[in-house]
């Protein structure tokens, strides 16, 4: 009996001495690899999804937890991860887990098999206008301004743009100028013998409408402003700019002359002068700095695309977008896209990622590690509008009157998911706050919303 106890004691002692170091190593992220016959440091995969509660599959095996969850103690190697949730399409990704590294997939958007659509306003409507990231929509029932409604996406309320006794009733609308993150619109229209420019501020109740026609001397190339000083607008011409103070009615014609491009921030004007220098100037001209002196074949480059819109980034990069859609940057490779760029979109929380699009393609510029450029979709036929979705991980775009959703992160699928069809010759608006896209339906011409990201 004593001998048996001693044998059991020594067996447990040997097991303890053998397993205890393994348990300690395991707690520090090491595991024995029987193939290599050595200890490997493990890796981890973290997964969260929208909606939550998706089943996690590692290869063919279902993991015990649901999203959000971390899969620990993975030996280095290739793995196929799949998420499945009822009513949603499965999401899959092949990943390589490196020794001692963690891979994170946050807020994976699980695409519904059918996107939920909601009726908002009965039509018929013929046009929808919105500024990026500005939660107000202008919806038109006809070409006349008195048919326009203002829809507040956050409150879910609609009201006529003009009061019943407005002096602008019956005014035909030709075009509308918008800016990012601004509730202000500048509406251009009227008859051939009485052209008008109206400043419209939807942040006021009722909407503030000011006729600034007398302050716009001729039809400008563009009208721009920054919402930090929304009553000061800039009329851009081919070689000069005027400043208009809407509140005081003051006009400063030819405020800056001899320019080939312009951009604005909350306190600076960025000017491309005739010598291809980029100058940064305070609004009131009390300070001017040379930001960049362009030398790379600049004479021919800036001759090709007329007036340039300038965008100065926080990381020191400066983008130039010409009228023919040529996209340039002030660092190698200098020329990013030769022609055809329609629009640019930054994710509002991170200016390291830029979305740009042409009629046929969507591209990404990533400044987080130098400058990386890649095309995420090149099979478009008539792309007109594009928005970042779900914290910059996806792009929602209109291609030939069909809203499509595509993953833009590296390693994502090249296939774009069809969301809904929209009315011909209309735009759409996506609100990150509500997770919904707003559009005019092609069948009944009513205003509708479709949920892209569940809130």
Image (cartoon, rainbow, N blue to C red):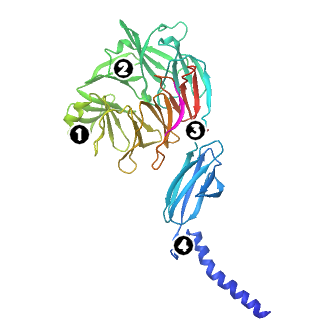
Lower position in the chain sequence, tag 3 or tag 2: 2
Magenta: main secondary structure: strand
The residue pinned by badge 1 equals 294
Upstream in sequence: badge 3 or badge 4: 4
SS label for mark 3: loop
Query: What residue sits 55% from the left and 58% below the top?
Result: 45
Q: Marks 3 and 4, how far apart in space?
A: 41 Å
Q: Position of residue 216 (x, y in %)?
A: 34, 15
Badge 4 marks a residue whose secondary structure is strand
Callout in the foreground (2, 1): 1
Q: Is 417 covered by the magenta stretch?
A: yes
Badge 4 density bin: few <14, some 14–19, many ≥20, Cα 10 Å = few
Which residue is tagged 4? 33
Q: Which residue is disc 3 drawn over?
A: 453
The crowd level at tag 2 (other Cα within 10 Å; few <14, some 14-19, many 20+) is many
Residue 205, position in %: x, y?
A: 55, 19
**Residue linked to disc 2:** 244
Tell me how far mark 3 sits from mark 1, CA to CA.
42 Å
Q: Are marks 3 and 1 in contact (CB under 8 Å)?
A: no
N-terminal of the pair, mark 2 or mark 1, is: 2
Magenta stretch in the rendered image: 416-422
* Residue drawn 54% across the image and 56% down it: 80
Crowding at dot 3, Cα within 10 Å, few <14 / some 14-19 / many 20+, comes out as: many
Q: Residues within 10 Å of mark 1 (few under 14, many from 20)?
A: some
The numbered mark at residue 285 is none
In the displayed structure image, the side of residue 113 where residue 127 appears, left or right = left
Determine the secondary structure under disc 2.
strand
CA gap, disc 2 and disc 4: 72 Å
Which of label 1 and label 4 is nearer to you?
4
């Amino acid at each position: 009996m004593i001998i048996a106890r001693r044998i059991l004691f020594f067996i447990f002692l040997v097991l303890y001495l053998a397993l205890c170091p393994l348990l300690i190593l395991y707690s520090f992220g090491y595991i024995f690899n029987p193939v290599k016959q050595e200890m490997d440091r493990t890796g981890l995969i973290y997964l969260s999804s929208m909606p939550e509660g998706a089943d996690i599959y590692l290869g063919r095996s279902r993991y015990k937890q649901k999203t959000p969850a971390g899969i620990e103690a993975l030996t280095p190697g290739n793995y196929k991860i799949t998420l499945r949730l009822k009513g949603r399409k499965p999401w899959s990704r092949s990943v390589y887990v490196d020794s001692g590294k963690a891979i994170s997939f946050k807020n994976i958007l699980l695409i519904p098999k059918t996107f939920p659509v909601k009726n908002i306003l009965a039509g018929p409507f013929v046009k929808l206008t919105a500024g990026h990231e500005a939660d107000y929509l202008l919806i038109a029932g006809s070409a006349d301004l008195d048919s326009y409604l203002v829809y507040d996406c956050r409150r879910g309320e609609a009201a006529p743009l003009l009061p019943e006794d407005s002096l602008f009733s019956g005014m035909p609308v030709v075009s509308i100028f918008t800016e990012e993150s601004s509730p202000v619109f500048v509406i251009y229209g009227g008859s051939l013998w009485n052209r008008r420019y109206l400043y419209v501020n939807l942040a006021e109740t009722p909407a503030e409408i000011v006729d600034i026609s007398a302050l716009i001397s001729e039809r400008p190339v563009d009208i721009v402003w920054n919402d930090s000083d929304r009553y000061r607008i800039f009329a851009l011409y081919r070689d000069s700019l005027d400043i208009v103070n809407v509140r005081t009615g003051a006009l400063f014609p030819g405020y800056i002359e001899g320019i080939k491009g312009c951009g604005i921030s909350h306190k600076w004007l960025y000017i491309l002068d005739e010598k291809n220098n980029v100058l940064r100037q305070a609004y009131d001209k009390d300070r001017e700095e040379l930001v960049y002196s362009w030398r790379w074949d600049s004479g021919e480059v800036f001759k090709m695309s007329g007036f340039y819109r300038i965008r100065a980034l926080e990381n020191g990069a400066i983008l130039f977008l010409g009228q023919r859609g040529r996209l340039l940057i002030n660092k190698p490779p200098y020329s990013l896209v030769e022609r055809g760029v329609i629009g640019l979109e930054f994710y509002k929380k991170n200016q390291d990622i830029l979305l740009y699009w042409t009629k046929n393609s969507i591209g990404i510029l990533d400044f987080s590690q130098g400058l990386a450029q890649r095309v995420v979709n090149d099979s478009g036929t008539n792309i007109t509008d594009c928005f970042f979705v779900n914290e910059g991980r996806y792009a929602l775009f209109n291609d030939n009157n069909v809203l499509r959703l595509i993953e833009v992160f590296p390693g994502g699928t090249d296939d774009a998911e069809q969301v809904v069809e929209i009315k011909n010759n209309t735009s759409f608006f996506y609100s990150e706050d509500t997770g919904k896209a707003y559009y005019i339906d092609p069948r009944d011409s009513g205003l509708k919303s479709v949920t892209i990201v569940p809130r």
